[in-house]
Every structure is written in C-alpha cells, then in structure tokens.
Amino acid sequence: MFPENFIWGAATAAYQIEGAVAEDGRGPSVWDDLVRQPGRIWEGHTGETACDHYHRWREDVALMKEIGLRAYRFSIAWPRVLPEGAGAPNEKGLAFYDRLVDALLDAGIQPWVTLFHWDYPLALYRRGGWLSPDSPSWFADYTALVARRLGDRVAGWFTHNEPQCFIGVGLQEGRHAPGLKLGLSDVLVAAHHTLLAHGRAVQTLRAHVRKDAKIGWAPIGHVHVPATGSAADIAAAKRATFSIENDFMKNNTWWSDPVYLGRYPEDGLARFAPHLPKITDADLREIHQPLDLCGLNIYTAERLVRAGPDGRAVTVAEPPGFAMTHMRGTVHPEALYYGAKFFHERYRLPICITENGLSCADWVARDGGVHDPNRIDFLSRYLGEFARAGHEGVPLAGYFQWSLLDNFEWAQGYQHRFGLVHVDFATQKRTLKDSARWYRETIAANGANCA
C-alpha cells in the first residue's frame, strides 16, 4: 500500500502529443527545425500531428477519467504561449491550456505542469539559446506568464524535464534538438544557465501560484543497482550513483547537488576545472531554492555493480537472455527501490517518480483489444519496489506513469509505444490497453495489488 495522499498519475509532453505546430499562432521550436533535417528522425517522422491532442484534448481527458487518474502531468509548449520565446504572448495558446486545466479539474484530476520539456523556442535559440546569459531571464519571464495564467488552479509544478537530455543529448552528443556537438566548456555554460533558469523559475512560481502548490523538477535518476544485497555492494552502488565518472552530462550530482544542496559536487569541480564557467556564490544561492519533492524519471538501472577490492563499483555483466524492453532497456524494478532510497538519503525530500514505463511492441488484436501483459508485469514490479522503499521509511509523494498515450518518441519517431492508450497514428483512434484497465484497478486499490 501507498500513503493515503499518494499522487497517482500519468505524464505526457507537449511536442510528443499536441501536434498543431503551426496553428493558432504557435511559433516553431528547435524540434520543429530538427525534424525537417534529413536523416535526423527515424523514418523521417515529425511531431507535426503527433496524437493531435491539441484538437482531441476533450477525448483525452475523458480517457484519463476512465482510467481513474488522480493527476496528469503535462508540459506547456513554450512557443505556443510565446511564439518568439519572449515578448508578446499568444492568447490562443494560453487559452488552450486554460481549457485543458479546467477540464481536468471538472474531471476530478489534478493538473501538474512541466514548464520545459525540450521544445525550446527557435527564435530564442537563434539568439543563443541556453548559451546566452539572458536565457535564465527569458525562462523566468515565460514562467511568470504561465504562472499568472494557471497558478490559481494547478496543483504541482516542475521546472525542467531531464536536463541531462536536452543539454547532454541535445548540445553535447547532437542526437536531440538542436542537434549540436559543442565542446565541454560551452556545454557547462549551458548547463549552468539551465540551473539558474530553474532557480529563477522556482522563485517566480512561489510569487504567483497558489500557496499549497507543490514545486519540484524532473531530472533523470541514473541509478546504479547492487548485484547483491550485501552492505558492500549497496555502498558501492550508492557511491557510483552520486559520482561523476566521465565528461558527459549523464550524471546525477552535477545537476541535483546545486539544486538541493546549494553546491556543485567536488569530483565534478575537479574533473571539469579547465572548462568551468564563472560560478559565484550568488549563482548558487539563486539555484538553491526550497523544493517540496524530489522528482525522478527512472526507467532502468544505469548499471549493475558489485564492490571491488577498494570498495569502488565494478560493473557486473547482465546474464545471457536478460529481460529488456522494446527500446532495449534492461528491466531492473529494484531501480525504483534503490533510486528512492539513495536520493532521499542524500537530499532528504519526499520522492516523486515523475516518469516510469516501457516501450512494448503493442498492436490492436483481432478481438479489438490491445493486450500488453509485459507492461502490466513491468509496472507492477516497479511499483512494488517503490512501495518497498516506502515501507522502509522513504516518504513517497507520487508516481506518474509514462505515458498516457503512445506518442512521438523524439529521434525514434513512432517506432516505440509507451502509452496506456494505443494510438493509431493514421486515424488517431484511441484504444485503452489492458494495462490502462490494470492501472485503474491499481489506483483504486492504492497499489495494494503491487506492494
């Protein structure tokens, strides 16, 4: 069982579901630009239509109610409400989110807003994007616009989703928008500006949203799990989880230590020393704003480890035939147990799983249903491990399954299906999967069928 006030929800992102990229005054984003570049996206897919949620939101809210969701985490498309990223707002874009929030409340579903889920305004990117020292102010102004409009009704807020991806994969590896391969010095500047933007956004939210609203952010939780339950292996896994082992932005502490502890991690400062931007005490104070929960997107284990002779983590190979998802992610339910424990022990906040789910090879069967027993088994196992952390004293705030709908999976196009609801992208027909009905039962039982 989970706490009585546990938040049961599902999550989406604007560019992955909304479509209508050139309607009602929406400006282009870096993703609109990237998908038009040959060879960037699987099969040349785009988010131009996606799930057509911009037109079908009423149907989608009805599906959420049928599933029994208590909360829905969705993102605002920055260029939909500010076509140039700054300056004059787009009333039609704001009105869309007004209608969505009101419909959710009418359905008894709490709205939880993510301010940034990767669709950076193309106009601001051309002015420097996250490399610009003005980017934190741009983000704060955008936050103020949304907070003033929706802040009286929204239950919870997240600033950024997975900065490790939109900086590390978008600016360092070049696989995601805007598709750059910058040097480490530039990447660290962009990362620092991203963190400053988070801090300013939190301050802005506190000034404009209702006092009982919860505020956090949603980084990836890169969890190393121990190969055994021995104290030595657990200690090695925890140490690896909070270590910076290479120059890529795929880590926890460079992002979360400034946010939760008000300082950059020592191993990162030493490793990145030749490339660091100027970082002031005032910057760290601005980044380090009080938050109400620790959000984590966790799908798998970063790696399986054991303690070496010196206590450091040594990678353990997965056994032959190990379980993997359609996206080739390893299936490690204990990642939710160790992730919750490790992050709570370090940052001392209630844990909210802001994304968890898997891609399956789903299709509509001859009987008209979508049968996805692997998803049900996966979610049940992961939720059971999350509950185990709660039984051992970790405060659990909530869980947002990824995703409500099958959707545009970024550079992977439409080849992966994460949804509780199957979407026929040719007709836009929605079909509840077996997992959606299972999740309805799980919510009604407060997770007793998993724990």
Image (tube, helix red, strand yellow):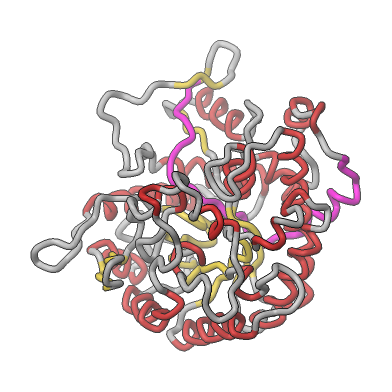
Left or right: residue 259 compared with residue 61: right
Question: In the image as oriented, which residue stretches furthest toward the left?
Answer: 366
In the rendered image of this protein, does residue 448 appear above or below residue 410? below
Residue at position x 61%, y 54% in the image: 294
Q: Nearer the viewer, residue 322 or 83?
A: 83
Above or below, comparing residue 189 to residue 148 in the picture = above
Q: Is residue 307 magenta?
A: no
The quarter of the rendered structure image containing the C terminus is bottom left
Query: Which is more toward the observer, 386 or 39?
Result: 39
| Residue 142 placement (x, y as % from top left) | 72, 70
Residue 301 forms part of the magenta stretch: yes
Residue occupying the point 64% across, 54% down: 349
Note whether 396 is above or below 182 in the view shown: below
Residue 449 place in picture, x, y as percent: 30, 59
Residue 71 visible in the displayed image: no
Bounds of the magenta segment: 278-306
